[in-house]
Amino acid sequence: MADFLTAFIPNRTKREKWREELMKSDLSFMIRKGLAEIMAGIIPHKMARNRWRGIFRYGLLRGVRLRWKVYHNRGMSPKHYLTVCAIAKNEGPYFQEWIEWHHNLGVEKFYIYDNESTDNTTDVLVPYIASGLVEYVFRKGVKQQLPVYDDCLEKHRLDARWIAFIDLDEFIVPVQDKTIPGFLSRFEGASAVEINWLIYGSGGAREKEAGGVMERFKRHSEPDHVLNRYVKSIVNPRRVFSFIGCHEVARMSGKNVDSHGQPVRKNFTDREPRQDVIRINHYAVKSYEEFLKKRARGRARTLDIRNLDYFERFDLNDIEE
């Protein structure tokens, strides 16, 4: 099956890469992804190609059924206004700070997918699960980030008004509003709101010290650094099909907008970052010791292991708060 699906990809390097991914990953997901890559590849415009890649991966027939489901349930009010979805592996020491930060800023529910953690993740999450704040799912396998994101969309299309898809090293920080829902209230017609990173470096720390992440790391990059062009999305699950990558979604209706409410017309890599209204503090490396542990955990989206030069790229300490 993998040989058949990749036979039409002309570039040998890409063909071998896709064949390896099909053999090692969730087969049904990768079949849809492989076919979507082929079909969307003929579309010349980058933004249109990305959107159709997401639609093809979701499936045209499934898309028709989804539109009917959303229309049929249009009068149903969501149970939660703002929720968060995350996949994590061995992030136990960071969960409490991350959950408390976002809960205090208006997040009503966390959908946590545990990708085979072997640390104290479940111990930390038990009280949050018992209170109903966290919905916990144990998820096996490699390269599970996009399958998890799409699973979360399918399960919670009707009971969540907004779902923020972020990682455990990312903290949403509203700048002009007191809460995240206060910010989102201006974007009720949007399919997704894309929020830029602000990269925080190690501050020279070699070993993990006591204290929370936001307390320990106070130095960040220049706001206009090219890495800050990356975004994460807060999504209206009734208006999107699926994720294109871990940063953006294929919309079903409405518009994807930036933090100023402007419709997204360029890929995020081609736009200047905006952090004056809201931003995501991205603690990509923390201390060098913590980075090495992060590197050993592997990645949620790809089989590749981060190179050691990843630390140098993301260890940005230009400005102190």
Image (tube, rainbow, N blue to C red):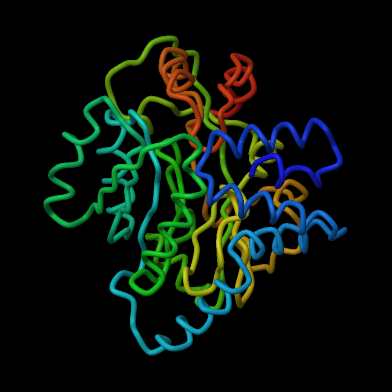
Q: Looking at this view, is 232 or 154 the one in front?
A: 154
Please identify the quadrant where the N terminus is shown: top right
Identity of the residue drawn at 31% across and 30% down:
117
Compared to residue 217, the image places residue 185 above or below, namely below
Residue 20 drawn at (x, y percent): 64, 32
Residue 199's place in the image compared with 297, above or below, is below
Q: Which residue is drawn at the image coordinates 29% and 48% (left, top)?
A: 137
Image position, residue 36 (x, y; %): 69, 56
From the viewer's perspective, tell me whether residue 203 is left or right of residue 77.
right
Measured as percent of width and height from the top left, residue 304 is found at 59, 25
Q: How many marks?
A: 0
Q: Is residue 319 left or right of residue 76?
A: right
- Compared to residue 44, the image places residue 76 above or below, namely below
Name the one closer to the observer, 126 or 233.
126
Return the x and y of residue 149 as percentages of the image width and height.
Answer: 47, 53
**Left or right of 253 in this view: 125:** left
Q: Residue at x 34, y 85 (%)?
A: 76
Q: Hey, which residue is sitting farthest top in the picture?
A: 206
Q: Nearer the viewer, residue 11 or 197?
A: 11
The quarter of the picture where residue 178 lies is bottom left
| Residue in the image at 12% along x and 51% along y | 130
